[in-house]
Image: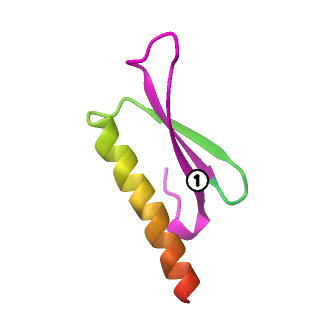
Amino acid sequence: VVIPLHELKAVNPSCNNANPAEKYIQVISVDNHEFWFMGFLNYDTAVGFLQDALQTGKVILSEA
C-alpha cells in the first residue's frame, strides 16, 4: 500500500487488549479510509517513523 504524505490524516498505534503482543498500526487517509497493519519486526520504530512522516508532511504542506 502506498499513501502519499499529503493524503495522511492520522497514524494510531493499537494493541489487542486480550493479547497485548498483538500490535497494530492504524493509518487513516484524509478521505477517512482506514488501513490496518500488523506483523512489524520493530513495532515501536515503525510507529515512530510513520508519526514523524505524518508531522513532516503537515509542516511541508503548511509552508507551501
Q: Is residue 47 left or right of residue 17?
A: left
Residue found at x 53% / y 59%: 3
Q: Quadrant of residue 62?
A: bottom right
Task: Tell me if residue 10 is in the magenta stretch.
Answer: yes
Position of residue 64 relative to residue 6, above or below, is: below
| Quarter of image, res 43 | top left
Above-or-below relation of 39 to 31:
above
Q: Nearer the viewer, residue 44 or 29?
A: 44
Residue 41 colored in magenta in the image:
no
- Which residue is most to the right? 31
Q: Which residues are magenta?
A: 1-28
Q: Name the side, left or right, on which 28 lies relative to 24.
A: right
Find residue 1 and report its horizontal and vertical position in percent. 49, 49
Residue designated by label 1: 10
The residue at the far left in this view is 41
**Quarter occupied by the C terminus:** bottom right
Instruction: Give amino acid for label 1.
Output: Ala
Residue at the limit of the structure toward the bottom, as seen here: 64
State the colouring used for the structure image.
rainbow
Residue 11 or 37: which is nearer the viewer?
11
Q: Is residue 63 above or below residue 52?
A: below
Q: Secondary structure at mark 1?
A: strand
**Which x, y percent locates residue 11?**
52, 49
Q: Position of residue 22 (x, y in %)?
A: 42, 20
Residue 63 percent coordinates (x, y): 53, 88
Crowd band around label 1 with a 10 angstrom C-alpha radius: few (<14), some (14–19), many (20+): some
Tag count: 1
Residue in the picture at 32% in, 40% down: 44
- The residue shown at (48%, 62%) is 54
Instruction: Answer left or right for 11 relative to 44.
Output: right
In the image, residue 35 above or below residue 49: above
